[in-house]
Amino acid sequence: QNLGYHVSIKGSPVDTNKIEGSEYLQKYFSEYDMNGDSGHPSADLIRLHAYELEEYDAVVLVDYDTLVLGSADEVYDLITDKGNAENGGNSIDAVFSWEHVPSLINPNAKASVVNLSFLVIRPSKATFRNLISTYQSSPFAAGKGWGMIGRGSFPGWMTSQGFLTFYYDEVANGSKVEMNRCYFGNTGEKYPTKLTLFTNGGKLECASSAGASSNQCNDCNHAKLEDIYVADLSYCLAPWECGGDDALFTSDNALSSGLCRKFHKQWFGGRLQMEDVHPQIQKGSGILCVDGKYQPMLVAQHESQV
């Protein structure tokens, strides 16, 4: 708040006691409730409240490990009326790229899902209500997941990432635009020679002729930094973890990826720039990692003038 952000505290918009479409989800959430565990999984659905922000033409959902490297005006234009006019008047309500996350049913496969590190939406309270209703009434099966297509189990399959993947696959398929994941949401991850993907088109073998012609199978680790608008640092070790060179850049580590190194350099540069341009932040020494510990930003203590 001291830096000019408006903070809004919200609870989960989904009443899990009203889930009717899936006995599996009913049982899962009821058992969680009975155990009294902290960190209820439905809390992840808080991000759906972004659809209520109708005072804005477009809303961008990002994660804490999102790194914006360039202007994304062309993406925002797709959501605005200008973008709709260029699309023949058809409403575009969501713009995103695909992210490949580990499959929990096949250790040699990945699931292609909506990348929540950079999801641009057209806010609408009507859409928000439809999302809540759809979550509570849609089928969800063990081993398959949401809807008719399903991708099996993967991290986040019951909550926002899995649900929004299903929603823009089967409920609102015509209102989305898919961006090239090498330029929007690039993780810097190195890809194996052979990779199996569970996509909205079914199972895809990237080593096959079909995979070779699919954008889903592109090895985005070879993208040029200057062509990347948004990086997703979920694969690269977080810059603020401040690991030393010996720990970070080993051949079997995420940061053996050349892009991860470049992403880190960009992140540290932006972090230091904050101290130069924001009057509320205290100017530091220019060294962000000391003895393996990150030096956080500090709000400047301005002396009162008499």
Image: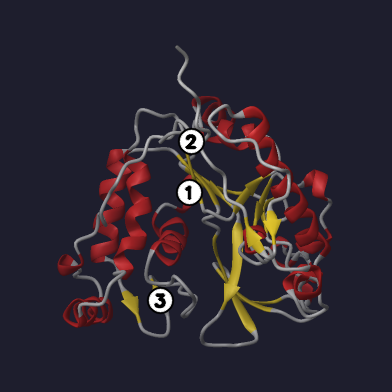
The quadrant where residue 188 appears: bottom right
Residue 266: x and y in percent read 74, 47
Evaluate if marks 2 and 1 touch, with contact meaning CB atoms under 8 Å apart. yes
In the shown orientation, is residue 39 left or right of residue 240?
left
The quadrant where residue 109 appears: bottom right
What amino acid is at disc 1? Gly
Evaluate if marks 1 and 3 touch, with contact meaning CB atoms under 8 Å apart. no
Earlier sequence position, callout 2 versus callout 1: 2
What amino acid is at disc 3? Gly
Mark 1, residues whose alpha carbon is within 10 Å: few (<14), some, or many (≥20)?
some
* Residue 145, disc: 3
The quarter in which the C terminus is drawn is: top left
Residue that carries the numbered disc 1 in the rendered image: 174
Numbered disc in front, either 1 or 3: 3
Earlier sequence position, callout 1 versus callout 3: 3
In the orientation shown, which residue stands out farthest toward the front? 306
Residue that carries the numbered disc 2 in the rendered image: 90
Separation of residues labelled 3 and 2 (CA atoms)? 30 Å
Evaluate if marks 3 and 2 touch, with contact meaning CB atoms under 8 Å apart. no
The quarter in which the N terminus is drawn is: top left
What amino acid is at disc 2? Asn
Separation of residues labelled 1 and 3 (CA atoms)? 21 Å
Provide the secondary structure element on which disc 3 rests.
Answer: strand
Residue drawn at x 36%, y 40% as measured from the top left: 7
Residue drawn at x 81%, y 74% as measured from the top left: 246
